[in-house]
Every structure is written in structure tokens, then in C-alpha cells.
Amino acid sequence: MILDSTHGRAYFRMDTPYFNGNNDKMKLNRQKKRLYLDLCALERPYDDQSYPRIEAETAAVTMIMALVKAKEYVLSYSPVHEDELQPIPDGAMRLEIVKLLHSYGEDAALVAEFGEVEKRGVALYGRGMGISDAMHVAYAESCGAEFITCDDDLLRKCRRNNVTIWCGTPVDFAKKEGLL
């Protein structure tokens, strides 16, 4: 991750120490887990880093992605990511996230039964989630991934709707996994 001090944003760079797979401290002995980061989490490094929470979540996302790159975790993504990325005006950010997903992620749509995902997404939408959020959660559930987001409101809705997978912030995940 590179911090652009001019714009106060951090960028994922595949050639940084976090992404080169050579950081021995990142080589932890753990069973591979499937992770699903929504766009809110994936965009966190591009947000204004002057806020402590954003800085902490950026560090956690960067650490998580380094472990994905090192094949310690399996990253899943879905067509919802593609749909949400289209209207983003920052072309460089959009391209970096697309490259990240396609280089290190697995398409959840290839393992998920779309009819079941759609049915679950509609049910979650009917219980108060936004349609994109509902579909992200439905895809994460369908592939048995742990769901990571920076959206507190979405996490409350996940708890309220008894989502069947672990859901939390990047910092929560890093703490749970003993990374922090």
C-alpha cells in the first residue's frame, strides 16, 4: 500500500512489501478461510487517512490482502463488485480494485447457485438491507466466506437478520485471527 500524501489516500500496489509474498511475519500457520470483502472494505485504502478508524481499517485491509496474496486466505468476489465499481469516477482506483479482485480472488458466482443467491438476496433486501448489500451477503453466505465490511449499519442488519456466516470489520477480523 502506498500513501498519496497529496490526496490523503492510500493505494494498493502489487509491488510493495505487503504484496510481494515475502514478508515472513505474514506467514502464519492457519487453515485457509474464504473471505468476502465488500466494496466498502476494498475502497478503505482510498479514503481520507487522517481519521484514526479509517487508518486502522486500511492497515487491517492491507494486512488481509497481503495474506490473500500469500495464499493464506481465499478471496471471493461476485458480480455485485463489478456492478458497484462501474460508476466510480476515479478510474485509477477502479482499475486497481478490479486487478486486485481478478488477480487474487475467485468468482463466487462460479460456485454459487444463482437461484439460491438471488432468493436469499431478495429475502435480505425485504428485511431492510440495500439490494447491493443484500446480494454481497447472499454471495458470501453461498460460498461460506467470512464477510468483511466497514459499514456499521450493514453489520447491525446482518446481526439482526441472523446471517449464517461471520460478519465484521477488517479490524475485527484481524483481531479474531490474531493478526493485531
Image (tube, rainbow, N blue to C red):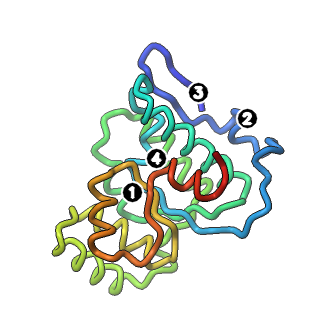
Measure the alpha-carbon separation of dots 3 and 4. 14 Å
Mark 1 or 2: in front is 2
Query: Regarding mark 3 in the picture, which secondary structure is present there?
Result: strand
Q: Do the residues labelled 4 and 1 touch (CB within 8 Å)?
A: yes
Dot 3 or dot 4: first in sequence order is 3
Who's the residue at 32% across and 52% down the image? 152
Q: Is any part of residue 92 visible from this angle?
A: no
**Residue identifier under label 3:** 2
Who's the residue at 31% across and 40% down the image? 88
User: Label 3 sits on what residue type?
Assistant: Ile
* Above or below for 31 versus 169: below
Dot 4 or dot 1: first in sequence order is 4
Measure the alpha-carbon separation of dots 1 and 3. 23 Å
Dot 2 or dot 3: first in sequence order is 3
Measuring from the top left, give residue 161's x and y in whole percent.
Answer: 28, 74
Measuring from the top left, give residue 29's x and y in whole percent.
Answer: 79, 61
* Above or below for 37 versus 139: above
Label drawn at residue 24: none
> Relative to 35, is 109 on the left or the right?
left
* Above or below for 144 versus 46: below
**Residue identifier under label 4:** 42
Dot 2 or dot 4: first in sequence order is 2
Q: Do the residues labelled 3 and 4 touch (CB within 8 Å)?
A: no
Measuring from the top left, give residue 114's x and y in whole percent.
Answer: 37, 81
> Relative to 15, is 156 on the left or the right?
left
Measure the alpha-carbon separation of dots 2 and 3. 10 Å
> Relative to 126, is 170 on the left or the right?
right
Who's the residue at 43% across and 39% down the image? 44
Q: Which of 80 and 159 is in front in this view?
A: 159
**Residue identifier under label 1:** 81
Measuring from the top left, give residue 4's x and y in whole percent.
Answer: 51, 20
